[in-house]
Amino acid sequence: MLVALLLLLTVLSQGAAAMSGQAGASRDILRDAAAAHQAGDMATAIRLYRKFLKEYPDAAEIRSNLGAALVENGQFTEAIPEYSAALQKLPNNPRVRMNLALAYYKLGRLPDAVLDLEILHKLQPLELKPALLLADCLLQTGQARKAADLLTPLQEEYPDDHAVIYMLGMALLQENRTADAQVLLDGGRETRARLVLRHVALEPLREARRGHHKRKKDDRWQRSHVPYLLHFNSSSRTVFVQSTSRTFERSSYPFICA
């Protein structure tokens, strides 16, 4: 259920005795906004959240819900100031910070995403979702060594996790640490992530070194993608996405928009 419904009475209780009529009308607006959001009618939800926030501009959780509705409507640029305003009121809320980072990511503003993701990772270093998204941002911005350093303790904690294996393997390969990548591939039970890495990344490198062919620049090994993101075109990535979906069901974040 949306945060708006859970916090409805708390948000409206302030001053409700003095403004019972206004509070009742605002309660109805917010209930209708939450219902529209749950029904997938984002245009209506956005309009009603904004109407509510005119009366209660400091309702940070509701502003976060507005950001979520904007994201679901494809309005990432408009969502960022809403999440940012909510975060000013709720600086220790991991859900709001993570959703802000996701909005930055989807706009391609990776350095901005990294700033928020690094804060989350420091607070919860073994939480998979922010760590994997941070690693993906680092890989896309040419910081493979930093990504490998981030992922190594995660791989020790989750030795057979598909997403961690895949992304750490990609980081090691981008650093030309093929021996370490081979240890990673051979170090645990066979998984689809290991199979994907072996066939789309490590084997072509081995073949190139044997002189059979030159390794082509291929985005299958140049970029890594975690399965809740947007860019999956090759059949090998599709296999990986299907094999890693359970990783993200374990996330503790109550996402609205992810």
Image: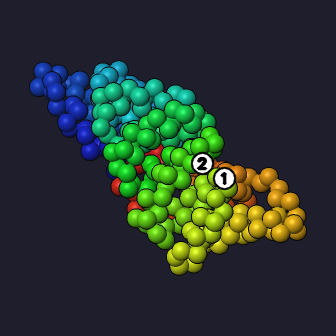
Out of 130 and 27, give the one closest to the viewer.
Answer: 130
Out of 211 and 42, give the one closest to the viewer.
Answer: 211
Please identify the residue farthest to the left as the structure is shown. Answer: 17
Q: Position of residue 68 (x, y in %)?
A: 45, 39
Q: Position of residue 255 (x, y in %)?
A: 41, 48
Mark 1: give few (<14), some (14-19) or many (20+) Cα within 10 Å: some
Q: Position of residue 139 (x, y in %)?
A: 60, 47
What amino acid is labelled 2 in the image? Ala
Kindly check if marks 2 and 1 are in contact, taking CB atoms under 8 A apart as contact: yes
Q: Looking at the rendering, which quadrant does residue 185 occupy?
A: bottom right
Q: Secondary structure at mark 1?
A: helix
Out of 98 and 4, give the one closest to the viewer.
Answer: 98
What amino acid is labelled 1 in the image? Gln
Judge left or right: residue 25 versus residue 239: left
Q: Residue at x 66, y 63 (%)?
A: 178
Q: Residue at x 49, y 67 (%)?
A: 161
Rendered image coloring scheme: rainbow
Q: Please give the residue where the numbered disc 2 appears in the rendered image.
A: 144
Q: Earlier in the sequence, mark 2 or mark 1?
A: 2
The answer to whether residue 188 of the structure is visible from this angle is yes
**60 in relation to 167, above or below:** above
**58 in relation to 203, above or below:** above
Judge left or right: residue 250 versus residue 245: left
Task: State the mark number for residue 61.
Answer: none
CA gap, disc 2 to disc 1?
Answer: 6 Å
Q: Secondary structure at mark 2?
A: helix
Q: Please give the residue where the numbered disc 1 appears in the rendered image.
A: 174
Please identify the residue farthest to the right as the structure is shown. Answer: 212
The answer to whether residue 241 of the structure is visible from this angle is no
Judge left or right: residue 171 versus residue 18: right
- Total numbered circles: 2
